[in-house]
Image (cartoon, coloured by chain):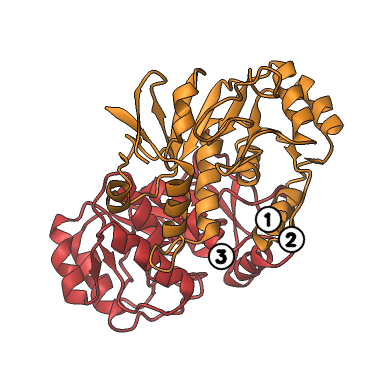
Chain colours: A red, B orange
Amino acid sequence: MSLKTLGPKPAAELDKELMSEEGGFSIDQLMELAGLSVSQAGGDGLVCARHLYHYGYTPKVYYPKPTDAPIFVGLQRQLGHLHIPFLTTPEEFASTLGTTDLIVDALFGFSFHPPVRAPFDAVLTSIIDSSRPVLSVDIPSSWDVAGGPPSDGDQVGHDFMPEYLVSLTAAKPCVRHYKGRRHFVGGRFLSRDVATKYGLDVPDYKGVDQIAEVPVDVKVEERL
Amino acid sequence: MSLKTLGPKPAAELDKELMSEEGGFSIDQLMELAGLSVSQAGGDGLVCARHLYHYGYTPKVYYPKPTDAPIFVGLQRQLGHLHIPFLTTPEEFASTLGTTDLIVDALFGFSFHPPVRAPFDAVLTSIIDSSRPVLSVDIPSSWDVAGGPPSDGDQVGHDFMPEYLVSLTAAKPCVRHYKGRRHFVGGRFLSRDVATKYGLDVPDYKGVDQIAEVPVDVKVEERL
Protein backbone atom coordinates (compact mmCIF):
# COMPACT_ATOMS: atom_id res chain seq x y z
CA MET A 1 0.00 0.00 0.00
CA SER A 2 1.41 3.34 -1.02
CA LEU A 3 0.11 6.89 -1.16
CA LYS A 4 -0.31 8.24 -4.68
CA THR A 5 0.11 11.97 -5.18
CA LEU A 6 -1.02 14.37 -7.88
CA GLY A 7 0.91 17.44 -8.96
CA PRO A 8 -0.83 20.78 -9.52
CA LYS A 9 -1.56 20.28 -13.22
CA PRO A 10 -3.33 16.90 -13.01
CA ALA A 11 -4.98 18.00 -9.75
CA ALA A 12 -6.43 21.01 -11.58
CA GLU A 13 -7.42 18.76 -14.49
CA LEU A 14 -9.18 16.39 -12.10
CA ASP A 15 -11.15 19.27 -10.56
CA LYS A 16 -12.03 20.51 -14.03
CA GLU A 17 -13.14 17.04 -15.11
CA LEU A 18 -15.37 16.62 -12.05
CA MET A 19 -16.98 20.01 -12.74
CA SER A 20 -17.32 19.56 -16.50
CA GLU A 21 -20.72 19.03 -18.06
CA GLU A 22 -19.72 15.39 -18.35
CA GLY A 23 -18.53 15.13 -14.71
CA GLY A 24 -21.78 16.58 -13.41
CA PHE A 25 -20.56 18.12 -10.12
CA SER A 26 -21.17 21.77 -9.28
CA ILE A 27 -18.62 23.89 -7.45
CA ASP A 28 -21.20 24.23 -4.65
CA GLN A 29 -21.31 20.46 -4.17
CA LEU A 30 -17.55 19.97 -4.25
CA MET A 31 -16.85 22.81 -1.82
CA GLU A 32 -19.55 21.53 0.51
CA LEU A 33 -18.06 18.04 0.52
CA ALA A 34 -14.49 19.32 0.80
CA GLY A 35 -15.37 21.60 3.71
CA LEU A 36 -17.26 18.78 5.40
CA SER A 37 -14.21 16.53 5.08
CA VAL A 38 -12.00 19.18 6.63
CA SER A 39 -14.45 19.79 9.48
CA GLN A 40 -14.41 16.09 10.32
CA ALA A 41 -10.60 16.10 10.72
CA GLY A 42 -10.58 19.07 12.92
CA GLY A 43 -12.93 24.06 4.92
CA ASP A 44 -12.45 24.63 2.51
CA GLY A 45 -12.31 27.32 5.21
CA LEU A 46 -15.77 28.88 5.10
CA VAL A 47 -17.75 25.65 4.77
CA CYS A 48 -15.56 24.08 7.44
CA ALA A 49 -16.28 26.97 9.82
CA ARG A 50 -20.03 26.48 9.37
CA HIS A 51 -19.86 22.75 10.11
CA LEU A 52 -17.56 23.34 13.11
CA TYR A 53 -20.10 25.81 14.50
CA HIS A 54 -22.85 23.20 14.19
CA TYR A 55 -20.59 20.66 15.92
CA GLY A 56 -20.54 23.01 18.94
CA TYR A 57 -17.26 24.86 18.41
CA THR A 58 -16.90 28.67 18.29
CA PRO A 59 -14.94 29.34 15.09
CA LYS A 60 -13.64 32.73 13.96
CA VAL A 61 -12.66 33.30 10.36
CA TYR A 62 -9.72 35.34 9.11
CA TYR A 63 -10.96 36.54 5.74
CA PRO A 64 -9.12 39.66 4.59
CA LYS A 65 -10.29 39.91 0.99
CA PRO A 66 -13.99 39.15 0.44
CA THR A 67 -14.83 38.48 -3.20
CA ASP A 68 -17.98 39.15 -5.21
CA ALA A 69 -18.23 35.59 -6.52
CA PRO A 70 -21.76 34.37 -5.67
CA ILE A 71 -20.58 31.20 -3.94
CA PHE A 72 -18.42 33.18 -1.49
CA VAL A 73 -21.08 35.83 -0.96
CA GLY A 74 -23.51 33.03 -0.09
CA LEU A 75 -21.07 31.33 2.28
CA GLN A 76 -20.38 34.63 4.07
CA ARG A 77 -24.12 35.12 4.56
CA GLN A 78 -24.50 31.60 5.94
CA LEU A 79 -21.75 32.32 8.50
CA GLY A 80 -23.23 35.73 9.27
CA HIS A 81 -26.52 34.10 10.26
CA LEU A 82 -24.57 32.01 12.78
CA HIS A 83 -22.88 35.17 14.14
CA ILE A 84 -19.44 33.77 13.34
CA PRO A 85 -16.95 36.67 13.61
CA PHE A 86 -14.85 37.66 10.59
CA LEU A 87 -11.34 39.00 11.24
CA THR A 88 -9.74 41.13 8.54
CA THR A 89 -6.33 42.27 9.77
CA PRO A 90 -3.24 40.30 10.86
CA GLU A 91 -3.46 42.12 14.21
CA GLU A 92 -7.04 41.05 14.82
CA PHE A 93 -6.09 37.52 13.84
CA ALA A 94 -3.04 37.43 16.11
CA SER A 95 -5.06 38.73 19.07
CA THR A 96 -7.36 35.69 18.97
CA LEU A 97 -4.61 33.06 19.01
CA GLY A 98 -4.30 32.97 22.80
CA THR A 99 -7.78 31.44 23.09
CA THR A 100 -7.64 29.25 19.99
CA ASP A 101 -7.56 25.46 20.36
CA LEU A 102 -6.99 24.69 16.68
CA ILE A 103 -6.07 26.74 13.63
CA VAL A 104 -7.49 25.54 10.32
CA ASP A 105 -5.01 26.71 7.70
CA ALA A 106 -6.87 27.16 4.41
CA LEU A 107 -5.04 30.29 3.29
CA PHE A 108 -3.86 29.11 -0.12
CA GLY A 109 -4.76 26.45 -2.65
CA PHE A 110 -2.57 24.04 -4.58
CA SER A 111 -1.77 26.65 -7.22
CA PHE A 112 0.05 28.86 -4.67
CA HIS A 113 3.58 29.88 -5.58
CA PRO A 114 6.07 30.95 -2.89
CA PRO A 115 7.03 33.28 -1.36
CA VAL A 116 4.24 34.26 1.03
CA ARG A 117 3.36 37.91 0.43
CA ALA A 118 1.97 40.56 2.81
CA PRO A 119 -0.30 40.47 4.77
CA PHE A 120 -0.11 36.67 4.88
CA ASP A 121 3.55 36.62 5.94
CA ALA A 122 2.57 38.32 9.22
CA VAL A 123 -0.38 35.94 9.65
CA LEU A 124 1.74 32.85 9.09
CA THR A 125 4.45 34.14 11.41
CA SER A 126 1.90 34.66 14.17
CA ILE A 127 0.58 31.12 13.62
CA ILE A 128 4.05 29.62 13.90
CA ASP A 129 4.98 31.77 16.91
CA SER A 130 1.76 30.79 18.72
CA SER A 131 2.75 27.10 18.81
CA ARG A 132 -0.98 26.29 18.57
CA PRO A 133 -1.95 23.09 16.75
CA VAL A 134 -2.61 23.64 13.06
CA LEU A 135 -4.63 21.58 10.58
CA SER A 136 -3.58 22.47 7.04
CA VAL A 137 -5.90 21.98 4.10
CA ASP A 138 -4.26 20.29 1.12
CA ILE A 139 -0.92 22.12 1.38
CA PRO A 140 0.64 23.75 4.44
CA SER A 141 0.68 27.49 3.70
CA SER A 142 4.02 28.70 2.34
CA TRP A 143 4.91 25.23 1.00
CA ASP A 144 5.42 24.62 -2.69
CA VAL A 145 3.06 21.97 -4.08
CA ALA A 146 6.02 19.92 -5.28
CA GLY A 147 9.02 21.12 -3.30
CA GLY A 148 7.55 21.41 0.19
CA PRO A 149 8.66 24.05 2.71
CA PRO A 150 10.85 26.98 1.61
CA SER A 151 14.49 25.88 1.69
CA ASP A 152 15.72 29.40 2.39
CA GLY A 153 15.95 29.71 6.20
CA ASP A 154 15.07 33.41 5.95
CA GLN A 155 11.72 32.79 4.27
CA VAL A 156 8.52 32.66 6.29
CA GLY A 157 7.38 29.06 6.59
CA HIS A 158 10.73 27.24 6.32
CA ASP A 159 10.00 25.86 9.82
CA PHE A 160 6.22 25.38 9.39
CA MET A 161 5.09 21.81 10.13
CA PRO A 162 1.36 21.51 10.90
CA GLU A 163 0.24 18.84 13.38
CA TYR A 164 -2.51 17.73 10.98
CA LEU A 165 -2.93 17.66 7.20
CA VAL A 166 -6.08 16.99 5.15
CA SER A 167 -5.41 16.23 1.48
CA LEU A 168 -8.42 16.89 -0.71
CA THR A 169 -9.23 14.19 -3.30
CA ALA A 170 -5.54 13.26 -3.63
CA ALA A 171 -2.34 14.00 -1.73
CA LYS A 172 -0.03 16.49 -3.41
CA PRO A 173 3.67 15.68 -4.01
CA CYS A 174 4.89 17.90 -1.14
CA VAL A 175 3.38 15.35 1.26
CA ARG A 176 6.75 13.54 1.22
CA HIS A 177 8.02 16.45 3.33
CA TYR A 178 5.18 16.09 5.83
CA LYS A 179 6.39 15.06 9.28
CA GLY A 180 3.39 16.11 11.37
CA ARG A 181 1.25 13.87 13.57
CA ARG A 182 -1.71 12.82 11.43
CA HIS A 183 -2.60 12.87 7.73
CA PHE A 184 -6.13 12.45 6.38
CA VAL A 185 -7.51 12.24 2.85
CA GLY A 186 -10.94 13.75 2.23
CA GLY A 187 -13.40 14.16 -0.63
CA ARG A 188 -15.47 10.99 -0.69
CA PHE A 189 -16.94 11.42 -4.15
CA LEU A 190 -14.35 10.06 -6.57
CA SER A 191 -15.49 7.27 -8.90
CA ARG A 192 -13.21 4.26 -9.43
CA ASP A 193 -13.06 5.15 -13.13
CA VAL A 194 -11.67 8.59 -12.43
CA ALA A 195 -9.35 7.28 -9.70
CA THR A 196 -7.97 4.71 -12.15
CA LYS A 197 -7.56 7.33 -14.87
CA TYR A 198 -5.43 9.46 -12.54
CA GLY A 199 -3.56 6.50 -11.03
CA LEU A 200 -5.04 6.99 -7.58
CA ASP A 201 -6.36 4.61 -4.93
CA VAL A 202 -9.73 5.29 -3.31
CA PRO A 203 -8.87 5.65 0.41
CA ASP A 204 -10.19 3.14 2.93
CA TYR A 205 -13.02 5.25 4.35
CA LYS A 206 -14.83 3.84 7.40
CA GLY A 207 -18.59 3.90 7.97
CA VAL A 208 -20.05 7.24 6.97
CA ASP A 209 -16.79 9.18 7.52
CA GLN A 210 -15.87 11.78 4.91
CA ILE A 211 -12.16 11.39 5.73
CA ALA A 212 -9.73 8.47 5.91
CA GLU A 213 -6.48 8.49 7.87
CA VAL A 214 -3.26 7.62 6.07
CA PRO A 215 -0.17 6.52 8.04
CA VAL A 216 2.34 9.38 8.15
CA ASP A 217 5.16 6.96 7.30
CA VAL A 218 3.40 5.47 4.23
CA LYS A 219 5.40 5.04 1.01
CA VAL A 220 4.68 7.95 -1.34
CA GLU A 221 4.33 7.50 -5.11
CA GLU A 222 4.14 10.53 -7.38
CA ARG A 223 1.73 9.70 -10.18
CA LEU A 224 2.16 12.84 -12.24
CA MET B 1 -38.78 18.16 25.31
CA SER B 2 -41.20 17.99 22.42
CA LEU B 3 -40.93 17.64 18.66
CA LYS B 4 -41.98 20.75 16.75
CA THR B 5 -43.45 20.25 13.30
CA LEU B 6 -43.87 22.52 10.30
CA GLY B 7 -46.74 22.38 7.83
CA PRO B 8 -46.13 22.56 4.09
CA LYS B 9 -46.49 26.34 3.79
CA PRO B 10 -43.95 27.36 6.46
CA ALA B 11 -41.71 24.46 5.38
CA ALA B 12 -41.70 25.87 1.86
CA GLU B 13 -41.11 29.37 3.25
CA LEU B 14 -38.17 28.11 5.29
CA ASP B 15 -36.61 26.50 2.19
CA LYS B 16 -37.19 29.71 0.27
CA GLU B 17 -35.63 31.79 3.04
CA LEU B 18 -32.54 29.57 3.18
CA MET B 19 -32.13 29.87 -0.60
CA SER B 20 -32.86 33.59 -0.82
CA GLU B 21 -30.08 36.05 -1.57
CA GLU B 22 -30.16 36.88 2.12
CA GLY B 23 -30.08 33.22 3.24
CA GLY B 24 -27.06 32.49 1.07
CA PHE B 25 -27.57 28.74 0.47
CA SER B 26 -27.68 27.27 -3.02
CA ILE B 27 -29.98 24.42 -3.98
CA ASP B 28 -26.82 22.36 -4.67
CA GLN B 29 -25.63 22.79 -1.10
CA LEU B 30 -28.97 22.02 0.51
CA MET B 31 -29.59 18.93 -1.58
CA GLU B 32 -26.06 17.70 -0.87
CA LEU B 33 -26.57 18.11 2.87
CA ALA B 34 -30.07 16.65 2.80
CA GLY B 35 -28.93 13.62 0.81
CA LEU B 36 -25.98 13.15 3.14
CA SER B 37 -28.31 13.20 6.14
CA VAL B 38 -30.52 10.58 4.54
CA SER B 39 -27.54 8.37 3.63
CA GLN B 40 -26.39 8.44 7.24
CA ALA B 41 -29.75 7.08 8.43
CA GLY B 42 -29.89 4.33 5.98
CA GLY B 43 -31.15 11.44 -0.76
CA ASP B 44 -32.67 13.31 -1.27
CA GLY B 45 -32.70 10.11 -3.39
CA LEU B 46 -29.95 10.72 -5.93
CA VAL B 47 -27.42 12.29 -3.56
CA CYS B 48 -28.20 9.58 -1.02
CA ALA B 49 -27.53 6.87 -3.60
CA ARG B 50 -24.12 8.35 -4.36
CA HIS B 51 -23.11 8.47 -0.70
CA LEU B 52 -24.45 4.93 -0.10
CA TYR B 53 -22.30 3.70 -3.00
CA HIS B 54 -19.22 5.29 -1.44
CA TYR B 55 -20.13 3.67 1.91
CA GLY B 56 -19.83 0.29 0.15
CA TYR B 57 -23.48 -0.48 -0.67
CA THR B 58 -24.79 -1.32 -4.16
CA PRO B 59 -27.74 1.02 -4.66
CA LYS B 60 -30.12 0.97 -7.61
CA VAL B 61 -32.28 3.98 -8.40
CA TYR B 62 -35.89 3.94 -9.57
CA TYR B 63 -36.08 7.14 -11.59
CA PRO B 64 -38.92 7.03 -14.09
CA LYS B 65 -39.03 10.66 -15.23
CA PRO B 66 -35.62 12.29 -15.73
CA THR B 67 -35.80 16.09 -15.87
CA ASP B 68 -33.71 18.61 -17.77
CA ALA B 69 -32.97 20.73 -14.68
CA PRO B 70 -29.17 21.10 -14.51
CA ILE B 71 -28.90 19.90 -10.91
CA PHE B 72 -30.65 16.60 -11.75
CA VAL B 73 -28.70 16.17 -14.99
CA GLY B 74 -25.50 16.62 -12.97
CA LEU B 75 -26.58 14.16 -10.26
CA GLN B 76 -27.50 11.55 -12.90
CA ARG B 77 -24.04 11.92 -14.46
CA GLN B 78 -22.38 11.53 -11.05
CA LEU B 79 -24.28 8.26 -10.51
CA GLY B 80 -23.55 7.14 -14.07
CA HIS B 81 -19.81 7.41 -13.40
CA LEU B 82 -20.30 5.03 -10.47
CA HIS B 83 -22.23 2.60 -12.72
CA ILE B 84 -25.27 2.79 -10.47
CA PRO B 85 -28.20 1.27 -12.40
CA PHE B 86 -31.31 3.33 -13.12
CA LEU B 87 -34.65 1.52 -13.22
CA THR B 88 -37.49 3.16 -15.11
CA THR B 89 -40.53 0.87 -14.94
CA PRO B 90 -42.53 -0.50 -11.99
CA GLU B 91 -41.75 -4.02 -13.29
CA GLU B 92 -38.00 -3.41 -13.29
CA PHE B 93 -38.28 -1.94 -9.82
CA ALA B 94 -40.35 -4.83 -8.46
CA SER B 95 -37.91 -7.39 -9.88
CA THR B 96 -35.07 -6.02 -7.73
CA LEU B 97 -36.92 -6.14 -4.42
CA GLY B 98 -36.01 -9.77 -3.66
CA THR B 99 -32.35 -8.79 -3.24
CA THR B 100 -32.88 -5.40 -1.60
CA ASP B 101 -31.89 -4.89 2.04
CA LEU B 102 -33.36 -1.41 2.40
CA ILE B 103 -35.67 0.75 0.31
CA VAL B 104 -35.09 4.50 0.50
CA ASP B 105 -38.47 6.05 -0.22
CA ALA B 106 -37.89 9.51 -1.70
CA LEU B 107 -40.71 9.38 -4.26
CA PHE B 108 -42.55 12.56 -3.28
CA GLY B 109 -41.84 15.78 -1.43
CA PHE B 110 -43.84 17.59 1.23
CA SER B 111 -46.06 19.25 -1.36
CA PHE B 112 -47.49 15.88 -2.50
CA HIS B 113 -51.27 15.61 -2.51
CA PRO B 114 -52.99 12.21 -2.38
CA PRO B 115 -53.97 9.99 -4.02
CA VAL B 116 -50.92 8.22 -5.45
CA ARG B 117 -51.20 8.15 -9.24
CA ALA B 118 -49.84 5.67 -11.80
CA PRO B 119 -47.15 4.43 -12.13
CA PHE B 120 -46.34 5.15 -8.48
CA ASP B 121 -49.35 3.24 -7.15
CA ALA B 122 -47.86 0.01 -8.57
CA VAL B 123 -44.43 0.90 -7.19
CA LEU B 124 -45.75 1.59 -3.70
CA THR B 125 -47.86 -1.58 -3.75
CA SER B 126 -44.79 -3.65 -4.62
CA ILE B 127 -42.86 -1.96 -1.78
CA ILE B 128 -45.58 -2.77 0.75
CA ASP B 129 -46.04 -6.33 -0.56
CA SER B 130 -42.28 -6.99 -0.36
CA SER B 131 -42.24 -6.47 3.44
CA ARG B 132 -38.69 -5.09 3.01
CA PRO B 133 -37.57 -2.40 5.46
CA VAL B 134 -38.23 1.12 4.19
CA LEU B 135 -36.64 4.43 5.13
CA SER B 136 -38.91 7.29 4.11
CA VAL B 137 -37.56 10.75 3.42
CA ASP B 138 -39.59 13.53 5.07
CA ILE B 139 -43.02 12.01 4.41
CA PRO B 140 -43.92 8.36 3.81
CA SER B 141 -45.10 8.18 0.21
CA SER B 142 -48.91 8.33 -0.10
CA TRP B 143 -49.26 10.15 3.24
CA ASP B 144 -50.73 13.64 3.43
CA VAL B 145 -48.32 16.17 5.00
CA ALA B 146 -50.90 17.01 7.67
CA GLY B 147 -53.33 14.10 7.75
CA GLY B 148 -50.98 11.13 7.53
CA PRO B 149 -51.89 7.86 5.75
CA PRO B 150 -54.97 7.66 3.51
CA SER B 151 -58.00 6.92 5.70
CA ASP B 152 -59.80 5.14 2.88
CA GLY B 153 -58.91 1.46 3.23
CA ASP B 154 -59.11 1.05 -0.55
CA GLN B 155 -56.40 3.62 -1.27
CA VAL B 156 -52.82 2.55 -1.84
CA GLY B 157 -50.77 3.39 1.23
CA HIS B 158 -53.46 3.21 3.91
CA ASP B 159 -51.37 0.44 5.52
CA PHE B 160 -47.92 1.91 4.74
CA MET B 161 -45.75 2.34 7.86
CA PRO B 162 -42.01 2.61 7.08
CA GLU B 163 -39.54 1.19 9.61
CA TYR B 164 -37.49 4.40 9.46
CA LEU B 165 -38.26 8.07 8.84
CA VAL B 166 -35.84 10.96 8.21
CA SER B 167 -37.40 14.41 8.59
CA LEU B 168 -35.47 17.08 6.71
CA THR B 169 -34.86 20.33 8.64
CA ALA B 170 -38.10 19.92 10.58
CA ALA B 171 -40.63 17.16 11.15
CA LYS B 172 -43.90 17.58 9.27
CA PRO B 173 -47.27 17.39 11.08
CA CYS B 174 -48.05 13.87 9.80
CA VAL B 175 -45.29 12.58 12.08
CA ARG B 176 -47.94 12.18 14.81
CA HIS B 177 -49.18 9.21 12.79
CA TYR B 178 -45.72 7.66 12.61
CA LYS B 179 -45.51 4.35 14.47
CA GLY B 180 -42.37 2.92 12.86
CA ARG B 181 -39.16 1.90 14.61
CA ARG B 182 -36.85 4.92 14.38
CA HIS B 183 -37.19 8.60 13.51
CA PHE B 184 -34.27 10.87 12.62
CA VAL B 185 -34.04 14.58 11.89
CA GLY B 186 -31.46 15.71 9.32
CA GLY B 187 -30.20 18.93 7.76
CA ARG B 188 -27.52 20.23 10.12
CA PHE B 189 -27.32 23.73 8.74
CA LEU B 190 -30.12 25.67 10.46
CA SER B 191 -29.09 28.79 12.38
CA ARG B 192 -30.58 29.40 15.83
CA ASP B 193 -32.08 32.64 14.50
CA VAL B 194 -34.02 30.83 11.79
CA ALA B 195 -34.97 27.98 14.14
CA THR B 196 -36.35 30.52 16.63
CA LYS B 197 -38.23 32.38 13.90
CA TYR B 198 -40.00 29.16 12.89
CA GLY B 199 -40.50 27.95 16.47
CA LEU B 200 -38.20 24.95 16.04
CA ASP B 201 -35.58 23.35 18.27
CA VAL B 202 -32.16 22.53 16.83
CA PRO B 203 -31.88 18.74 17.30
CA ASP B 204 -29.28 17.29 19.64
CA TYR B 205 -26.77 16.19 17.00
CA LYS B 206 -23.82 14.11 18.22
CA GLY B 207 -20.20 14.52 17.10
CA VAL B 208 -20.02 15.06 13.34
CA ASP B 209 -23.33 13.27 12.62
CA GLN B 210 -25.62 14.87 10.06
CA ILE B 211 -28.67 13.24 11.68
CA ALA B 212 -30.11 13.12 15.20
CA GLU B 213 -32.50 10.45 16.46
CA VAL B 214 -35.79 11.53 18.01
CA PRO B 215 -37.73 9.15 20.29
CA VAL B 216 -40.72 7.76 18.40
CA ASP B 217 -42.96 8.40 21.40
CA VAL B 218 -41.92 12.06 21.82
CA LYS B 219 -44.65 14.66 22.36
CA VAL B 220 -45.46 16.39 19.05
CA GLU B 221 -46.19 20.13 18.82
CA GLU B 222 -47.49 21.62 15.59
CA ARG B 223 -45.94 25.06 15.21
CA LEU B 224 -47.73 26.17 12.07
Asked whether the residues under marks 2 and 3 belong to the same chain, the reply is no
Do the residues under discs 3 and 1 have CB atoms within 8 angstroms? no
Of A32 and A171, which appears nearest the observer?
Answer: A32
Q: Which residue position holds label 3? A: A27
- Three-letter code for the amino acid on which mark 2 is drawn: Asp
Do the residues under discs 2 and 1 have CB atoms within 8 angstroms? yes
Left or right position of A14 against A56 = right
Q: CA distance from mark 2 to mark 3?
A: 19 Å
Q: Looking at the image, which residue is at 34% across and 38% down?
A: B223
**Mark 3 crowd level (few <14, some 14–19, many ≥20, 10 Å Cα):** some
Q: Looking at the image, which residue is at 67% across and 53% down?
A: B75
Q: Which residue position holds label 2? A: B68
**Mark 2 crowd level (few <14, some 14–19, many ≥20, 10 Å Cα):** few
Q: Which residue position holds label 1? A: B72
In x, y percent, where is residue B175?
46, 28
**Mark 1 crowd level (few <14, some 14–19, many ≥20, 10 Å Cα):** some
Q: CA distance from mark 3 to mark 1?
A: 15 Å
Q: CA distance from mark 2 to mark 1?
A: 7 Å
Q: Quadrant of the C terminus of chain A?
A: bottom right
Q: Chain of mark 2?
A: B
SS label for mark 1: helix
Q: Nearer the viewer, mark 3 or mark 1?
A: 1
